[in-house]
Image (spheres, coloured by chain):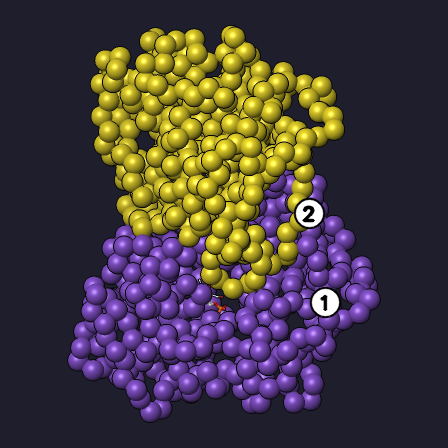
Chain colours: A purple, B yellow
Amino acid sequence: MGLNTTSEIDIVRVSSSKIDSIDFENISFGTTFTDHMFVCDFREGNWQRPQIKPYEPFLLDPSAKVFHYGQAIFEGMKAYKDEHDDVWLFRPDQNMDRFNKSAKRMAMPEVPEDIFMSGLHQLIDLEREWVKKGLGNTLYIRPFMIAIGSGVIAAPSTQYRFMIILSPAKSYYSGEVKVIIAEHFSRAANGGIGAAKAAGNYSAQFYPTKLANEKGFQQIIWTDDATHTKLEEAGTMNVFFRINDTLFTAPTSERILDGVTRKSLISIAERDGINVEVRSVLVSELVEAAKDGSLKEVFGAGTAAVVNPIVGFSYQDVYYELPKIENSFALQLKDKLNSIQYKLADDTFGWTVKV
Amino acid sequence: MGLNTTSEIDIVRVSSSKIDSIDFENISFGTTFTDHMFVCDFREGNWQRPQIKPYEPFLLDPSAKVFHYGQAIFEGMKAYKDEHDDVWLFRPDQNMDRFNKSAKRMAMPEVPEDIFMSGLHQLIDLEREWVKKGLGNTLYIRPFMIAIGSGVIAAPSTQYRFMIILSPAKSYYSGEVKVIIAEHFSRAANGGIGAAKAAGNYSAQFYPTKLANEKGFQQIIWTDDATHTKLEEAGTMNVFFRINDTLFTAPTSERILDGVTRKSLISIAERDGINVEVRSVLVSELVEAAKDGSLKEVFGAGTAAVVNPIVGFSYQDVYYELPKIENSFALQLKDKLNSIQYKLADDTFGWTVKV
Ligand SMILES: Cc1ncc(COP(=O)(O)O)c(C=O)c1O
Ligand SMILES: Cc1ncc(COP(=O)(O)O)c(C=O)c1O
């Protein structure tokens, strides 16, 4: 294995880039991909020689394990361009660690650091033109791994494909976000795979989310599946609640994804004197706080959306609207996080990594 | 849509069959496929013209939704050949209904009956040579559907592929099966997707099962995730417990797959005067019954394994061995079910369907 020099990646370039055909001002999230992709296969117990090559479809057998048993994990991260045209990653070590935790939980091989990191750096280096300057412009990075071995027997695959694909993006959400608090459906089980960024966790949410959409809500805030009394997280975001001047967010657990945005916001808030309490928040507390006016803000936090203010929530068919406030913690924290990511402020935490 | 005549399936045959190269006596489950497959795509809100064509790999975009968000469901059923060379299906309507329930839960389009059934019948008709005579020989049938639309945004796909592939098989399990009762890990959440035959439910079990294997156990019997006190089902089988002369099995729920074998065995047992109680069995009851000798049998029931006697179980690191008994209910029921499936006995239930 041991890939110590970046020269060990085979690189095949496109003959001509499609970048000039892209309208970067009108791009919808996750639908446009750059010219190249990174691919590294695992078989016979070993990672094979990695490649960077033109972005293109690939062949799989109809019995490929990913289709039948869902061994598939991913990460979501971003690259940012600063005013000097330098390109930066944000805490990529966190994503790599989480990826490998997901891999372990799904009985998939961990991706060695040199493959993950040199793949990431070299691919983005090749695609730097695709990272556009200006707040809100990013290159969304999607590392993922799927089971490509064939055979319809419910057991782990012996063959896997690790890939990185890149998609230029503006911010993920637009418009007002109203949420429903889950009363029946659930995202994760105790002793389940909720803490893994496993493909199956997402499709499990589509049907309940569709029902929420039909009622005019964009997202669901999941609760613990055993009692539906504790607030956990949203579909692709961790969630913060501001009651008076304290920020609350659920502790990570085996049911909750350990979000990089969440932990970064906690660090920024603590540095800047905002009181943060990491503890389970009960649905009943939220409803009480909404009723007595102490609930000031609710917001989601995740790489795609960065910080996403929520304008109201529904619980047991009652809709609670959040107040419009000055000095929103959500917007302050979003600004501060973005300033670090785009190198507009000092990165006192040492979170940014140059490509 | 409306496919009313079977002639509406496009059929492209292989130029020469590979059947003569197959050693049917030494086939490992789920690894060999027949010459043809059935394919029908869904796009722009409609099912497209179905095809039967040579079994072969197909192309998918790296951003295909099935890789990232796990929209993938399947079924498992079998075809049997009787002494007159007729080929039979067993309760295919049950699998179709369950498939469409899974589809709904995963926000995927339901497959119309005419597509599902005429695909199944015509494909198997074309491959009748692959169904071998003799008890234990079957053609395993794998209908499945995956999201083939592209885009890394966590929302349902607009494009899907429904396929049926066929794999000649002997019985699934061999050797003694010892199980561990789950104390920490779980298969399904309340309000989750446990009752769907969704791909993600299976990979979620691989890591805990690997840990069980390392301790010398082949399977896990899952318990409810909230309390781990109620016995639910195994990875690919429902579970029956015989205490004295009564058979117990958990009721189906949103955490448990509604197995066709399970419900068929219940019907046969009831017809033949075996007392069956469908109710939650507590782990504590099982342990008590094992200690006082009233626990006579534990067995799994599923299409692949048919009936799978369990020789012992471990709970809280104590191993409980099951007695070797005469007049095993497991073996009686297996015989009776097989007799119906292979047309050796009268099918008084009307379960078998000729291809
Ligand atoms: C379920 C879930 N929770 C939370 C998050 C937020 O995590 P991060 O901030 O690392 O993007 C994500 C998205 O990545 C997610 O999928
Ligand atoms: C989780 C699970 N439970 C039970 C079963 C048994 O169901 P059936 O008897 O319909 O094959 C299966 C397999 O099909 C399964 O995957």
Q: Which label is found at residue A35?
A: 1
Q: Is residue B187 above or below residue B81?
A: below
Residue A58, relative to residue B174: is it above or below? below
Q: Which residue is mark 2?
A: A59
Residue for point 73% across, 71% down: A18
Q: Amino acid at mark 2?
A: Leu
Query: Does A139 sit left or right of A105 as displayed?
Result: right
- Dot 1: chain letter: A
Q: CA distance from mark 2 to mark 1?
A: 19 Å
Indicate the position of residue B298 as horizontal and vertical percent values. 35, 23
Q: Amino acid at mark 1?
A: Asp
**Which residue shows up at 25% across the image and 78% down it?**
A321
Which of these two is toward me, A110 or B233?
A: B233
Are the residues flagged by discs 2 and 1 in contact, CB closer than 8 Å?
no
**Is residue B93 found left or right of A227 in the rendered image?**
right
Say above or below: B123 vs A320. Answer: above
Q: Nearer the viewer, residue B49 or B291?
A: B49
| Badge 1: residue crowd in 10 Å (few <14, some 14–19, many ≥20) | many
Look at the image and tell me whether residue B300 can be seen: no
Vertical arrangement, residue A17 with respect to residue B137, above or below: below
Q: Please state which of residues A340 and A272 is positioned toward the viewer in this rendering.
A: A340
Question: x and y percent of residue B72 in the render?
Answer: 50, 47
